[in-house]
Image (tube, rainbow, N blue to C red):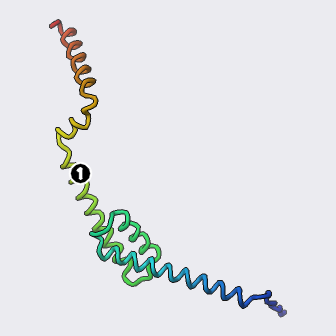
Amino acid sequence: MTAAIRLLPNMEARMDRITAQQRRANEDRELNLITARAVLNNAAMHRTSDVRNAIILLESRGDGRGDLIMAHEATGLLKIRERREAHAAAADETGLSIALRFRSRWLEIIAYAALIAGVMLYMTGWL
């Protein structure tokens, strides 16, 4: 059995248009990969979210030229950076900063403390 393939009208123009769209998509993809590699090459100068997006892009669409290795190394460096930022944020919080953060509720805190102290003194027989 043989089947005849019949071309649609303007098939050449349609194929050229599809080919042009694919070419533009490939150019965009290549530009995104180049940008992601540049971000990971100098990760210290970029925000954490940008580095994370570059890692995700290289892991999912990298073309095998060491992209997975670069993304893996950047993931380790990103974990170190986040841990360092968390420790710095915890070290910056002192008793004074906590007290100043609750400055608007000082009166309420002192009133409840006095109430609890009064109840405890009354229950123990000191009042």
Residue 89 at x, y percent in the picture: 23, 51
- Which residue type carries mark 1? Ala
Closest to the observer: 94 or 75? 94
Residue 85 at x, y percent in the picture: 25, 57
Is 19 drawn above or below residue 72 in the view shown? below
Look at 55% across and 80% down and name the residue there. 25
**Residue 21, located in which quarter of the rendered image?**
bottom right
Query: Seen from this angle, which residue lies furthest left?
Result: 126
Pointer 1 local density, CA inside 10 Å: few below 14, some 14–19, many at least 20: few
Residue identified by numbered label 1: 89
Look at 28% across and 59% down and name the residue there. 82
Find numbered disc 1 in the image and state the secondary structure of the residue it sits on.
helix
Residue 70 at x, y percent in the picture: 34, 76
Tell me the quadrant of the picture where the C terminus can be found: top left
Closest to the observer: 121 or 34? 34
Residue 104 at x, y percent in the picture: 28, 31
| Residue 15 left/right relative to 89 | right
Tell me the quadrant of the picture where the N terminus can be found: bottom right
Is 65 drawn above or below residue 107 in the view shown? below
**Residue 74, located in which quarter of the rendered image?**
bottom left
Is 115 drawn above or below residue 79 in the view shown? above
| Residue 102 left/right relative to 127 | right
Look at 25% across and 37% down and name the residue there. 101
Query: Seen from this angle, which residue lies furthest front?
Result: 104
**Residue 73, located in which quarter of the rendered image?**
bottom left
